Amino acid sequence: MESVLVIDFGGQYSQLIARRVRELRVYSELVSYDMAIEEISKKKPKGLIFSGSPYSVLSSDKTPPMVDKRIFSLGLPILGICYGMQLIAHLFGGKVVSSGRNEYGKTRVNLDINSPLFAGLKPAEVCWMSHKDSVLELPPSFRIIASTPNLPIAGIENPVRKIYGIQFHPEVVHTPSGMDILKNFLFEICGCSPTWTMISIIEKEVDEIKNTIGDGRAICALSGGVDSSVAAILVHKAIGDRLTCIFVDHGLLRKGEGSQVEKAFRENFKINLVHVKAKQRFLSKLVGVTDPEEKRKIIGNEFIRIFEEEARKIKDVDYLVQGTLYSDVIESGTRDAARIKSHHNVGGLPEDMELKLIEPLRLLFKDEVRNIGIELGLPEEIVWRQPFPGPGLAIRIIGEVTPERLEILKEADSIVVEEIKRAGLYKTIWQSFAILPCIKSVGVMGDERTYAYPIVVRAVTSEDAMTADWVRLPYSVLERISSRIINEVEGVNRVVYDISSKPPSTIEWE
Ligand code: XMP
């Protein structure tokens, strides 16, 4: 499989570069700048892209990330972006200086369209700049291919060695011709062909799973979300009946979700499915519990216990399938965030069973997983479903979870989702849902006094759930949501909209 490696120096857009390359149907992986040269060679890439970085090659107090100079002797085409270009200039004997001020934003850049990197572009294009340092003097045997009035050296090339550098960012949408520049690099300079399609990924994954599992057996914890669903279908394609999916339905799912998952897997895919309906078991454990962390722990532990009970009933299992994504792989270990909430998901299960892990999505981004899901025939409701926390609606009832409150929340939540979908906003919003705080307020309905719950509506945009902003929903949508919930859901007499961003709030209330 042809690939181009993105050498990551810690830039904020490194992941995005890899995604853009993949959008152009060339497989791309993000690797750390200190990966051993032998490891890089082993991957047999057709080219390398050096990412940006928060560091400066000039830094004397902190050691800037460098590469092993032998990387330039591999004979591979290289494209350096921002810090990547400065590093190339620095290592080849050019002069990098710090202007002391950030140059940030859209800039008109003059391009030498005789360079293969800019073939087919206009002589001047709007490009996105975000840098402090710049190249003041060219290294020997390089020439200038891009400039701006403030920045005489905004792009460099050594056409013989196929080494290129640009100070601006082709991977962001603010550089409208950025994809053309990447295309030129991939197809004209590296000689790649656009063969990395969803179908080719599916075939490769299925082959690999077959080779790994052989005639063994696997189990998978299905959550109803897109990741575990796609992982399960891929493994099913590879080993058929030797896969059993266990769907622990804690009764805290959204309206209709449990039966939707059951139908999709049993009917559409004929997958062996154990649907454990354990609502009573979970609700009885939650009686009297109001502390958010306690709720999370109880649900997490019970979930694992049930999963283990069921898994042990299936004989001779060797493998556990998990829907780990590439973003989880990249992020694991690099983020040392304080523990804000004890997250529970189907990952990390169950250690003492000594099962080997199968993670068919570990090299894929979420949007790629969705595309594969569509290709595999997974129903749209599952493919496009917004993220949902493992402990489910229990952490959206602020107070004790009771069957009555659960029903109220399910109904209200389904109205929120329906109206957001009706407004055509569902796919652009990260999450939109209802919360039930266990307080009551006075209202009046048909001349009668009511004393009932409020519903909080939350809708946020986000890239990765680490930060989020509340959605400026049109008043007409809010109005419909409010009037439908109050009219259709018994026990609710008030609707409010949460207008807090993360940080300082979080997406979920508990
Ligand atoms: P917060 O509330 O911390 O949530 O801003 C960030 C994202 O994580 C989801 N979430 C969870 N996902 N298990 C999960 O798999 C959990 O226990 C859990 N708690 C929160 C939340 O919905 C949001 O997308």
Image: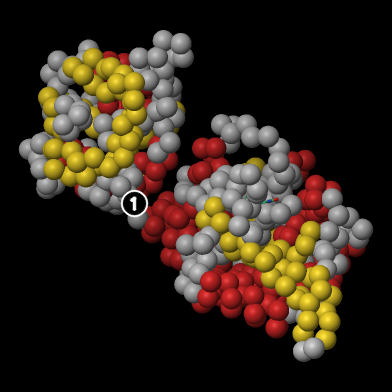
Quarter of the image for residue 395 reads bottom right
Q: Compare residues 342 and 365 and report the one nearer the observer.
A: 342
Q: Specify how the rendered protein is coloured.
A: secondary structure
Q: Position of residue 21 (x, y in %)?
A: 32, 45
- Labels in figure, total: 1
Q: Residue at x 65, y 49 (%)?
A: 506
Q: Is residue 216 left or right of residue 205?
A: right
Q: Compare residues 180 and 149 and report the one nearer the observer.
A: 149
Q: Which residue is mark 1?
A: 23
The vertical placement of 152 against 253, above or below, is above
Callout 1: SS: helix
Work out which quarter of the rendered image holds the N terminus and state it.
Answer: top left
The vertical placement of 132 against 416, above or below, is above
Q: Label 1 amino acid?
A: Glu
Q: Compare residues 427 and 358 and report the one nearer the observer.
A: 427
Q: Residue at x 38, y 46 (%)?
A: 19
Q: Compare residues 439 and 70 and report the one nearer the observer.
A: 439
Q: Residue at x 91, y 60 (%)?
A: 287
Q: Position of residue 458 (x, y in %)?
A: 63, 61
Q: Is mark 1 within 8 Å of ligand 1?
A: no
Q: Is residue 365 visible?
A: yes
Q: Position of residue 140 (x, y in %)?
A: 14, 15
